[in-house]
Image (tube, grey):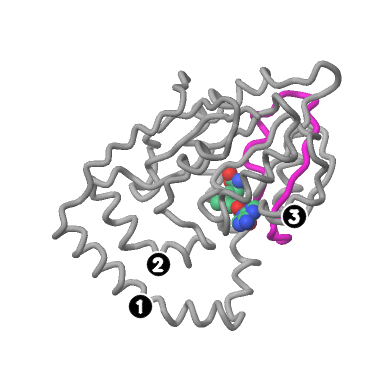
């Protein structure tokens, strides 16, 4: 995989004024239709969903990994550049879910996993058992915005795949990632992002977002995540925009790594 420096390659031609008005009207209608779900979430009626979602994510991950296996392989081959001078590679996986990336990590790596949803534990343990070439340090229940449990400058690599679409505060997560990475360590990412504004994908990403959010546990399809990564103050950035062979709403992806 060839990476290009700071490539904000998404064209910005945009929708016409008329199409923007239609898009906003449709999105508003979808928001109104999802209002009961919003109220149910506010009063805690959707908390059972946190138990159900790991089953769904586990199944989706198997399909996603099958389709994206080559892309993940190309990306994670770059991990070898970040070994410390002594000892094994220390990786923190933020928003680990069911442990979708373990098979791509080199033998002997030490892995710490973090996810705010404790119900992923069983699935995570399944993946750990399958990938016994790694050493697992701990599973911490926490969000990426608060990595207090992790010492600063203590890791060679932090990984986020399909996580920055769901976090509450992307700049805060990236600030935390930078804090825990050692100087010269790297943040690896593979994330779906908002499409080029001139496309129908962009239109439907905005219109269907309110439903998507509730189906996929707070996932947002309209984020220009690369802008946050570019603005986070890493010393070097290798970032690519790719079109993943997936459902059109999540086709546009970014992948790469940023060096502290
Ligand atoms: C779509 S899943 C991706 C899981 C896994 N990284 C993968 O590639 O399959 C999104 C994950 O992000 C986690 N997540 C949601 N909000 C988060 C936050 N604020 N900080 C860290 N992880 C978060 C979810 O619990 C879930 O495990």
What is the distance, in whole Å, between disc 2 and disc 3 at their CAs? 28 Å
| Residue 58 seen anywhere in this rendered image of the structure | no
* Between 180 and 100, the one nearer to me in the picture: 180
Is residue 94 shown above or below 214?
above
Is residue 179 shown above or below 77?
below
Residue located beneath label 2 in the image: 210
Counting residues from the N terminus, which is met first, the one under dot 2 or under dot 3? Answer: 3
Residue 61, percent from left and from top: 55, 46
**SS of the residue at dot 2?**
helix
Task: Please tell me in which quadrant of the rendered image residue 108 appears.
Answer: top right
Residue located beneath label 3 in the image: 121
| Residue 192 seen anywhere in this rendered image of the structure | yes
Residue located beneath label 1 in the image: 33
Left/right placement of residue 147 relative to residue 191 reads right
| Cβ–Cβ under 8 Å for marks 2 and 3 | no
Q: Residues within 10 Å of mark 3 (few under 14, many from 20)?
A: some
**SS of the residue at dot 1?**
helix
What is the distance, in whole Å, between disc 1 and disc 3 at their CAs? 34 Å
């Amino acid at each position: 995989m060839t990476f290009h420096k700071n490539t904000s390659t998404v064209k910005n031609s945009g929708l016409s004024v008329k199409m923007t008005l239609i898009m906003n009207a449709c999105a508003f209608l979808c928001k109104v239709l999802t209002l009961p779900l919003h109220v149910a979430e506010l009063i805690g009626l959707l908390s059972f969903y946190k138990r159900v979602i790991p089953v769904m994510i586990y199944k989706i991950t198997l399909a996603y990994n099958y389709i994206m296996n080559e892309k993940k392989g190309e990306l994670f081959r770059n991990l070898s550049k970040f070994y410390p001078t002594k000892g094994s590679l220390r990786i923190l996986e933020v928003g680990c879910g069911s442990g979708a990336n373990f098979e791509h990590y080199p033998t002997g790596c030490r892995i710490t996993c973090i996810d705010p949803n404790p119900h992923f534990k069983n699935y995570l343990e399944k993946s750990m058992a399958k990938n016994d070439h790694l050493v697992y340090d701990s599973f911490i229940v926490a969000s990426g915005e608060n990595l207090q449990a992790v010492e600063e400058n203590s890791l060679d690599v932090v990984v986020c795949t399909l996580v920055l679409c769901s976090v509450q505060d992307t700049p805060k997560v990236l600030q935390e990632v930078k804090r825990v990475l050692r100087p010269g360590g790297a943040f690896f990412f593979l994330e779906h992002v908002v499409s080029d504004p001139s496309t129908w994908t962009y239109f439907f990403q905005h219109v269907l977002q309110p439903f998507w959010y509730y189906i996929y546990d707070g996932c947002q399809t309209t984020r220009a995540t690369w802008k946050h990564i570019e603005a986070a103050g890493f010393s070097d950035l290798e970032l690519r925009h790719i079109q993943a062979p997936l459902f059109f709403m999540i086709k546009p992806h970014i992948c790469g790594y940023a060096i502290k």
